Amino acid sequence: DKWLDEVVDGVSNFVTPEMFGAVGDGVTDDTVAIQNCITFCHDKRVICIIPAGTYNLDTELHTVTDKNQHSALWIYSDMIVRGVANPVLKRTNRAITQMVHGYNDPATTAYNGIHSTIIDGIVFDANARLDNNCTLLSLSHGQNLTVENCQFRNVITWHCLEINSSRNVTVKKCKFDSDATTPATELLQLDVA
């Protein structure tokens, strides 16, 4: 694909989870590979591109600073995570109740958490057949955040998109789906600081 060959100033301006071992075949647990890609992109200030495919999230990860904070994936400040051709991040472990979470230091308060981050073109799938609570994407204590062109689906209870104690957040061109037999508690939850 042409986008795989894109180079800026002799250095690729993006990486993909496949470069870290992800398969995207709907069978393999891609959690660690995707997290390694996201962390690399944050550290190197390059874009995380997730190509078409179904990426199973079967492992619950903890933060380095607080073992009580857990999620399948962590998104950081000052980064872009962009899907190409609607890649699906699919929860495959019932124990995962936070699928993708914006990383904040345990001392975060007010609006000094995750900031200046764009999440674009991703399909978040809670996998309703697991029959358990799950929040698909949670962002808190942040600012200057954009979630666009995303799909949120198959949540039984809890939230498709949770935005807590944040300002200057844009949600646009997103689709919220729920199987008729699995009513989502809240498609979009907004809380104040």
Image: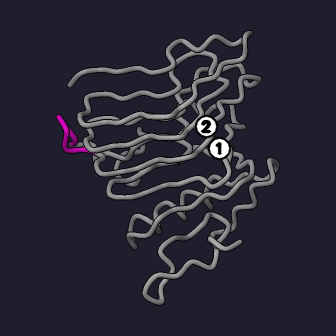
Residue that carries the numbered disc 1 in the rendered image: 89
Please, what is the dominant secondary structure of the magenta stretch?
Answer: loop
Residue at left 45%, top 21%?
A: 188
In the picture, measured across the screen, residue 77 lies left or right of residue 90, that is left
Along the line of sight, the residue nearer the viewer: 108 or 190: 190
Screen quadrant of the N terminus? bottom right
Instruction: Tell me where residue 98 appears, x and y as whole percent.
Output: 52, 33
Residue that carries the numbered disc 2 in the rendered image: 124
Q: Which residues are magenta?
A: 108-113
Residue 20 vertical position relative to residue 52 in the rendered view, above or below: below
Residue 47 vertical position relative to residue 69 in the rendered view, above or below: below
Residue at left 67%, top 24%?
A: 154
Q: Residues within 10 Å of mark 1 (few under 14, many from 20)?
A: many
In the picture, measured across the screen, residue 170 lies left or right of residue 172, that is left
Q: Residue furthest bottom?
A: 10
Mark 1: secondary structure: strand
Labels 1 and 2: the sequence-earlier one: 1
Q: Label 1 is placed on what type of residue?
A: Leu
Q: Label 2 is placed on what type of residue?
A: Phe
Instruction: Tell me where residue 180 appears, x and y as whole percent.
Output: 72, 11
Residue at left 32%, top 28%?
A: 164
Screen quadrant of the C terminus? top left
Mark 2: secondary structure: strand
Snapshot quadrant of residue 99: top right
Magenta run includes residue 110: yes
Residue 71 vertical position relative to residue 76 in the rendered view, above or below: above
